[in-house]
Amino acid sequence: MNIKISELAGTFFNASQLPLDSRPKILFFGRSNVGKSSLINTLLERRLARTSSMPGKTLSVNYYLVDRRLIFADLPGYGYARVSKDESARVRRLISDFLARVENVRLAALLIDSRHGFLPPDLDTLAQIVEKNLPILTILTKSDKISFSQQRNLIEQFKDKYGLAAISFSIKSPAGKIEIWRLIKEAIKE
Ligand SMILES: Nc1nc2c(ncn2[C@@H]2O[C@H](COP(=O)(O)OP(=O)(O)OP(=O)(O)O)[C@@H](O)[C@H]2O)c(=O)[nH]1
Ligand SMILES: [Mg+2]
């Protein structure tokens, strides 16, 4: 995929700022620090989304416009124990208000850390995505941190236990990126 243009197209801290927007969208959900912004940067081949080794970097919904026609929505990370209760509740509310309002979602990518698997807040997010009937793709991030056979087992487990298609991804290897782009293209076909 040759991306010609990508740019930050909006930053929203609360539901009242969310625009009505009918352009096709790919959403990126996941716990704080799971690698959402890093994945977006890898896909766009640019350091557009800010990343950090400190969890809680992205606290807003950020829209990236890709080739003038597709929106990548980088969602704030949830489940980080060290943010205040108020902040954590604000993030959860922002995500659920966003889900209630967002239009034309072509794919909801749910990122899960390969080392930790599903944790309770992920199941909560999964339930929200399922309730909205959105097409879902589970992406097992940081796959460089586990072995090849562990990756395979995890993918099997996601299929058997949750009925979810999952793929492994690492910012250190191009294989996952090619596959994710293939799935995105498939999802945005008219
Ligand atoms: N080893 C390894 N580290 C990664 C990978 N992806 C992301 N990281 C690192 O994990 C940290 C968090 O990455 P981010 O992309 O900022 O995570 P995020 O999900 O956007 O986090 P929040 O914005 O806090 O929700 C950074 O230090 C990244 O460099 C990966 O595939 N492998
Ligand atoms: Mg982020």
Image (cartoon, rainbow, N blue to C red):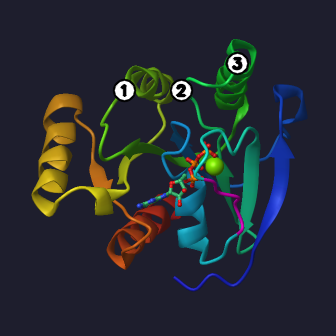
Q: Earlier in the sequence, mark 3 or mark 1?
A: 3
Q: Which of the numbered marks, if any, corresponds to residue 79?
A: 2
**Residue under pointer 1:** 119
Which residue shows up at 38% across the image and 77% down it?
A: 174
Name the secondary structure under disc 2: loop
10 Å neighbourhood of mark 2: few (<14), some, or many (≥20)? some
Q: Which residues are magenta?
A: 48-52
- The amino acid at mark 2 is Gly
Residue extending furthest toward the right: 17
Of the 4 image quadrants, the one containing the C terminus is bottom right
Q: Nearer the viewer, mark 3 or mark 1?
A: 3
User: Is 138 drawn above or below residue 171 in the view shown?
Assistant: above
Q: Quick one: 81 or 164, which is closer to the camera?
A: 81
Is residue 162 shown to the viewer in this render? yes
Q: Earlier in the sequence, mark 1 or mark 2?
A: 2
Inter-mark Cα distance, 3 to 1: 19 Å
Residue 19: give x, y in percent of width and height. 86, 40
Is residue 136 shown to the viewer in this render? no
Q: Earlier in the sequence, mark 3 or mark 2?
A: 2
Residue 143: give x, y in percent of width and height. 31, 58
Main secondary structure found in the magenta portion: loop
